Amino acid sequence: MNAIHPAFSWVHGLHFNNLRGDFYGGLVAAVVALPLALAFGVTSGLGAIAGLYGAIFVGFFAALFGGTPAQASGPTGPMTVVMAAIILKFPDEPALAFTAVILGGGFQVVFGLLGFGRYITLVPYPVISGFMSGIGGIILILQVAPFLGLESKPKVVENLMAMPTYLATFSLPAALIGSLTLAIVYLTPASIGKRLPPVLLALLIGTIVGNTFFPTLPMIGDIPKGFPTPIWPAMHTDALLLMVEDALVLALLGTIDTLLTSLVCDNMTRTQHDSNRELIGQGVGNIASGFFGGIPGAGATMRSVANIRTGGRTPLSGMCMAVILLGTLLGLGPLAEKIPLAVLAGLLIKVGFDIIDWRFLKHLVQAPRTEVLVMFVVLLVTVLVDLITAVGIGVVLASVMFVKRMADLELESLRVITGSSKETPLSLEEQRILDRNPERLILIHVNGPMSFGSAKDMIRRLESIEGFNHFSCVVLDLTDVPNIDGTAALAIEDMMVMVKDHGQHLFFVGMRPDVARVLTGLGVLHQVQPEYRYALRLDGLRHAARICGSTHPSDVLARGSLVSADAGKHA
């Protein structure tokens, strides 16, 4: 029982030492997943059965091929929101929507094969916080109507505008059943919740009470029986661009949603997931779900936590969850037809509140203003426009603000040193040279990288120095510059032109190999005579002092320390 058969050795994290824990974990995860899968299916516009198919196929194949052993996958709130938007684009041809799901799964597989998993962590947290809170808000907005016994509008903005009508014409029985569902979910004692998940308890009680006392409430309705039949992909030339765009949205959102859940699983199990393998597994699961008419899914935090807390540790638990859901579908489908939509709305309202990033929202006052701005911009664009636009705007906005902060730091690292200023980078002899030539020699010292963000501002700062054009020699000290980009290199060329226009002499000192390589590659260093390039700052200052007319015995050119004219080529 301890060894893994060679035929299963490729399944990440698989072993058979925890069969009991994996079975119970899968069972509890299935119990948690069932009501949510039904609710997500209804919300997507494809019906409850599509949610169940998604939970079965994504759950099984993501566990089989994935890289997070204890993760339980299936339909999630964010993926359902996107799927609902896709259905609105292709209301008459759902095959096109399922093709987008298949393409999205394909993109995830490609992401995993190309090793993109590690890059997802580069998405700024305020962007993630904004779109997660935005998705939570969308779920809440879309569930107000079914919670009140009414039919929801297809678009978020339409539902916002219809709120006064909803509140004026709501069904009291539906509101009571929805409220009962919410109360059970939130108020179930922990001692009972350990044995019977509150979401399942709310589903059972809400359904029984609704059918007993309010049999006219809107219900789920007919659920197809038996194993699903394949849906062959469809492709229209005029819809291709939309489908690819939707598929990319599903792939990116599913990737982020999944890998965030993988981190939660790692923290609980003290293991390390394989992010690229996980993307491949999720992609295969979504491809299978699309082929069989299921909605897309991702790693689901709620059912993954339930799985782990009950003992699930290997992919067997996720596969067990899917098999149990399949058995439930085949045997208990008719019973699900009687579930009131108000009950599902109550469950999804709880999901919507859970998705909102309350951790960040609680610290808005203390958080940096720029990050709060990014978070709210992404949140509003997510709710009012669409997710991919929100993420794009958020990443660009966060990147621009980051570049601005880095540029400010780079500008702070620029020191203009003359005989009248005392700066720590200089040795005693170097400071004496400047002291002896206070109005003829100026040293520009940069401490840190030079990039496009600060390049032009550095030149402007030099131009703004009072009396800069009166100095005879300018020494540019790059000793503490680890790297430089092309824009900054060309800015140095602009500085050379400025110095030349002033009739000044410009010396380069302390260039590192990487810096010299960039300057050489862009032709900047070729414009500097070899005798004006030094490896040591002291030697460059001595030569500059002599050019300035110093006759002090110590201001002697230290030959032999020149930087070779081909330093950039051989660096």
Image (cartoon, rainbow, N blue to C red):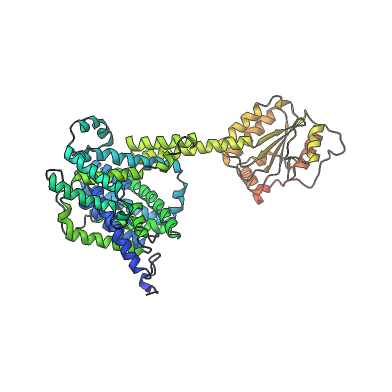
The picture quadrant where one finds residue 91 is top left
Judge whether residue 227 can be spotted in this image.
no
Q: Position of residue 80 (x, y in %)?
A: 29, 46
The picture quadrant where one finds residue 270 is bottom left
Depth check, front residue: 416 or 96? 416
Depth check, front residue: 495 or 282? 282
Quarter holding the N terminus?
bottom left
* Residue situated furthest left in the rendering: 216
* Residue situated furthest right in the rendering: 553
For residue 468, side relative to residue 411 (left or right): right
Q: Going 83% across and 33% down the picture, which residue do you hit?
A: 550
Judge whether residue 41 can be spotted in this image.
yes
Q: Going 68% across and 44% down the picture, which residue do you hit?
A: 511
Q: Going 15% across and 43% down the picture, which residue do you hit?
A: 218
Q: Position of residue 567 (x, y in %)?
A: 68, 48
For residue 93, side relative to residue 110 (left or right): left
Q: Is residue 333 above or below residue 407?
A: below
Depth check, front residue: 564 or 226? 226
